[in-house]
Amino acid sequence: MNKKRDMTQGSLADKILLYTIPIICTSVLQQLFNAADIAVVGQFVGKEAMAAVGSNSSIISLIINLFVGIALGSNVVIAHATGMRDGKAIEKAVHNSILLALTGGVIALLVGELLAGPILHLTGVPAEVFDMAVLYLRIYCLGMPVILLYNFESAIFRAHGDTRTPLLALIFAGVINVGLNLFLVVVLGRTVDGVAIATVTSNLISSMFLLWKLTHTDKDIRVQLRLLKPDKIMISNILRIGVPAGIQGSLFSFANVIVQSAVNSLGPTVMAASSAALNIEAIAYFVMNSFSQACTTFVGQNHGAGKFDRCRRVFKISLGLDALFTGSVCVLILIFGHQILGIFNSDPEVIRVGYMRLAFIFFAYILSMVQEVGSGYLRGFGMSLVPALVALVCICGLRLFWIFAIFPHWPTFRTIMLIYPISLWTTGIIILLMILIIRPSRKMEASVSKMNQAV
C-alpha cells in the first residue's frame, strides 16, 4: 500500500485533514454547480422556474441519499479490507459496488419516471410551477444510473485513501455543467429542461472519467469487466452496513420532503427563498459531513488493522476539526448572507426569508456536528443500525409531528424553521450518549484480547 495513504500508521490530524479537504472541495463544488441551476433559472427565467427546480431538491435528495448510504457500505467494507491488506476482498467489494450502482440507478430511473407527477402533487407544489417541476424531475431521473455510478466510484476511491481523483472528475464535469446551463438557457432560451439536461450530461462525464480511471489503475481497486459478477456474501456485507445508512439519509430527506410541502403552502416567494438558502446552507453541511466521511474511512481501516485506540482518537480529532471548519464557514456565510442570496434572486422578500432560514439552520449545526461525526464513527465499525434508528425517531419522527401537529396552528415560515434546531440538537445528544454507552472500540478491543488469550 502507498504509505502516503495508509491511515493505520503515523500522525492522524494532518492525515485526516489532507484526506478531508478534497472531499470538502468535491462536495462544495458539487453544491455550487447544483446551485448554478437555481441561479441561472432565477436570473434568466424567473422565480417561478427557480421555485420549480427548488421544489425537487428534497425529493432528489431522498433518492440519492438512499444509494449514497449504500455506497458508504462499500466504503466501509473496502476500508476494512484495506486495513487488513486483503486484496481479494477489495477486488470483490469494488466490482460488486459497481454492480449495485448500476442496478440501483436503473431502479431509481424507473421509479422516478413513473412517480414524478404523483410525488410532486403530494408535496403540494403550486399549480403555477407544477408542470416545470415535473419536467425537471423526469429529466433528472434519466441520469440516475450515471449519478449513482459517480457516487459509488467516489466511495471506492475514498475508501482506498484517494480523495483527489473524484475531485478532479467533478471539476471537469462541473465546468461543463455551468457552461451548458448558460448555453441552453441564455442562448437557446430553454427553461428548467435546460438546466436538467446540463446536470445529467455533467454526471455522465464525471462517472465515465472515474470508470476509465478505475479500469486503468494498477491498485487493488482496479475494475475489470470480466470480474463484474455478483457475489452474494460481499453484496450482503455491503448492504448490511449500507442499507441502514441509506435509510438514515433517506429518512432525513423524507422528513425534508414533508417540511418542503409546508414551505410550498406558503407560496412561490417563500419557496424561492427557501430554495436559495438551501443551496447556500448545503455548503456548510457538506463541510460538516466531509469529516463524518473521513471518520468512517479512518475508523474502518484502523478497525481492520485492529488498532482500536487510533479509532477513538480519530473520532475526537474529526469532531474537533469539524467544529473549527464548519463553524468558520457558517460565520462567513452569515456575514455575507444577504449578498449571496441576492445572486439567486434580487427580490428583497426572497432575501429576507432566505436569511432567516440560514440563521435557524446554522444554530442547529452546533450539535448536528456531533450527530454527523458520531454516526460516521459507529459506521466505521459496521454499526449502521444505531444511527439509523436514532434518525428515524429524532429527525423523521419529530419533524413529521411538528409539521402535522404544530404548523397548522401557527402556519408561518418561522414555525417551520424551529423544528431544525429541535430535531438536530436532540439527535446529536442521543448519538453522543449511544457512543458513550456502546463504546464500540472498547468492546471490540476486549473481544480481540480474549481471543488472543484463548489462542
Image (spheres, rainbow, N blue to C red):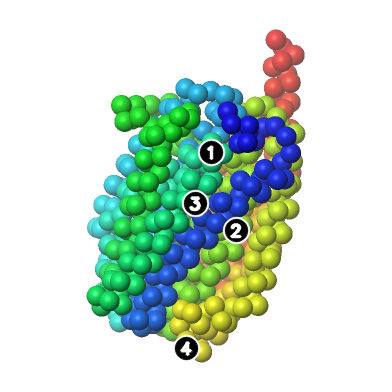
Q: Which residue is mark 3?
A: 167
Q: Which residue is mark 1?
A: 159
Residue at the spot 38% in from the left edge and 46% down from the top edge = 209
- Inspect the image, locate mark 2, and give the three-letter code of the amino acid beneath it: Val
The answer for how far apart the CA atoms under marks 2 and 3 are is 14 Å
Q: Which residue is mark 4?
A: 347
Residue at the spot 54% in from the left edge and 45% down from the top edge = 163
**Quadrant in the rendering for residue 116:** bottom left
In the figure, 2 relative to 61: above or below?
A: above
Q: Say which label, 3 or 4, has the lower sequence index.
A: 3
Query: In x, y percent, where is residue 299?
Result: 64, 38
Query: In x, y percent, where is residue 355?
Result: 57, 79
The answer for how far apart the CA atoms under marks 3 and 4 are is 34 Å
Using residue 437 as the reference point, say whether residue 217 is left or right of it. Answer: left
**Quadrant in the rendering for residue 235:** top left
The answer for how far apart the CA atoms under marks 3 and 1 are is 14 Å
The answer for how far apart the CA atoms under marks 1 and 2 are is 18 Å
Query: In x, y percent, where is residue 411?
Result: 51, 81
Report whether residue 12 is seen.
yes
Q: Say which label, 1 or 2, has the lower sequence index.
A: 1
Which of pointers 2 and 3 indicates the residue nearer the eye?
A: 3
Q: Give the total number of marks visible in the rendering.
A: 4
Q: Say which label, 4 or 1, has the lower sequence index.
A: 1
The label on residue 287 is 2
Query: In x, y percent, where is residue 119?
Result: 33, 64
Residue at the spot 41% in from the left edge and 37% down from the top edge = 214
In the figure, 343 relative to 57: above or below?
A: below
- Inspect the image, locate mark 4, and give the three-letter code of the amino acid beneath it: Asp
Using residue 441 as the reference point, say whether residue 32 is left or right of it. Answer: left
- Inspect the image, locate mark 1, and give the three-letter code of the amino acid beneath it: Ala
Report whether residue 56 is seen.
no
Q: Say which label, 2 or 4, has the lower sequence index.
A: 2
